[in-house]
Amino acid sequence: MDADYSRLQEVFGDRLRRQVSLARYTAARLGGPADALLIARDMADLTAAVRIAWEGRLPYRVLGGGANVLVADAGFRGLVIVNRADGVTFHEDGLIEAESGASLVALVRRCITRGLAGLEWAVSIPGTVGGAAINNAGAHGGDMAAVVRKVTALTPPGFVDYTGEEMAYGYRASRLKGSRDPYLVTAVTMQMAPGADPARLASQADVYVAHRKRTQPPGASLGSIFRNPPGDYAGRLIEAAGLKGASRGAVQISPVHANFFVNTGDGGAAADYLALIRLAQEEVRTQFGIWLEPEIELIGFDLAASGENSETV
Ligand SMILES: Cc1cc2nc3c(=O)[nH]c(=O)nc-3n(C[C@H](O)[C@H](O)[C@H](O)COP(=O)(O)OP(=O)(O)OC[C@H]3O[C@@H](n4cnc5c(N)ncnc54)[C@H](O)[C@@H]3O)c2cc1C
């Protein structure tokens, strides 16, 4: 039976859209339709939509930049809320409070202009501050764990604040990532070091951008598909397994970096993406005895059919 979207319709009117392709809301530029989609323009939209979903027991997902999710070709049977609540407050002492839908890259640029050091490593990481705080995004030796002082989340009983320590950060991991309890990250407080030279920060960011251009492919992808296993690199293992350049349909294991799978054109299918994930996992296990764990999340796949019972492969 179709979920009951009447309360959302009442509150959001025509802004609640039905059967909307998610391809343009994910960095891989593929994936089928959500039954219902709402762009949350601000925090009031975001919290109201999530509360209605909880109260009505609607299946729902919040998407930030969609930079870490693979959406099935069949789409998602439920409500997708795209988080565009992006207010940012800069305090004198280098403390920043960002709403969860703020773009991480835009925030990095604003910090650089203000001489606030601490986020330069994130200059090329797509997505939102909320997504980054949940996943402990990181690069070039930096990560969110080093700057996050507080994560504010809405839960069905009310707001909860977690300190950086309480977030229990690890490698692309936190207490919230994969949590089965319902939560919405609303805001993230970060500590920067004030008083830095903007020109120096900008040139450091340029070094990181140039490094990415040299080592990672352009085009529609989800960044690193697999977590690096202890003491090794997923990209190295996939390449050593002879899979660099392998493709399924329009999706290719990048010849530039084998942990990036690029949707090279129109008609790229999530099924092809998943087939390449399976191929890499099987080949690397057969050849090196290592099972690669995906870093990305799958949305809308019927994994039960293949004997799996969760959305993490
Ligand atoms: C080209 C490219 C390069 C990348 N490079 C890096 C890199 O160097 N380092 C790195 O760590 N990552 C990298 N990534 C991955 C990605 O950018 C990060 O994981 C990013 O932090 C995801 O943020 P997002 O807003 O897009 O999250 P989404 O993909 O939208 O969401 C991810 C998960 O978080 C949940 N979620 C998002 N926002 C909220 C919220 N406010 N409340 C509750 N749940 C929420 C979603 O439901 C989903 O389960 C890269 C991705 C791409 C495409």
Image (tube, rainbow, N blue to C red):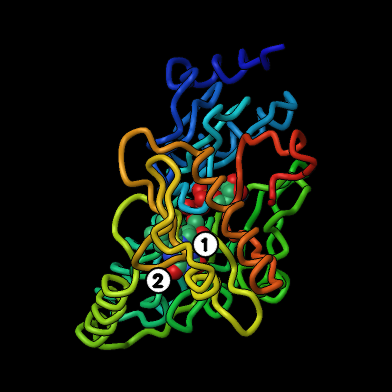
Q: Position of residue 257 (x, y in %)?
A: 40, 68
Label 1 SS:
helix
Q: Which one is nearer the viewer's eye here, 247 or 121?
A: 247
How packed mark 2 is, by other alpha carbons closer than 10 Å (few <14, some 14-19, many 20 or more), is: many
Q: Position of residue 159 (x, y in %)?
A: 69, 51
Residue at the left extreme of this rendering = 199
Residue 308's tag is none
How packed mark 1 is, by other alpha carbons closer than 10 Å (few <14, some 14-19, many 20 or more), is: many
Residue 41, above or below 287: above
Residue 132's tag is 1
User: Which amino acid lies under the numbered mark 1 shown in the image of this protein?
Assistant: Ala
Q: Position of residue 103 (x, y in %)?
A: 39, 56
Measure the alpha-carbon separation of dots 2 and 1: 10 Å
Return the residue at label 2: 122
Q: Could you tell me if residue 193 is visible in this image?
A: yes
Residue at mark 2: C-beta within 8 A of ligand 1: yes
Q: Position of residue 171 (x, y in %)?
A: 63, 74
Q: Which quarter of the picture shows residue 80?
A: top right
Contact? badges 2 and 1 (CB < 8 Å): yes
Q: Could you tell me if residue 100 is visible in this image?
A: no
Residue 82, above or below 79: below
Q: Which one is nearer the viewer's eye here, 51 or 239?
A: 239
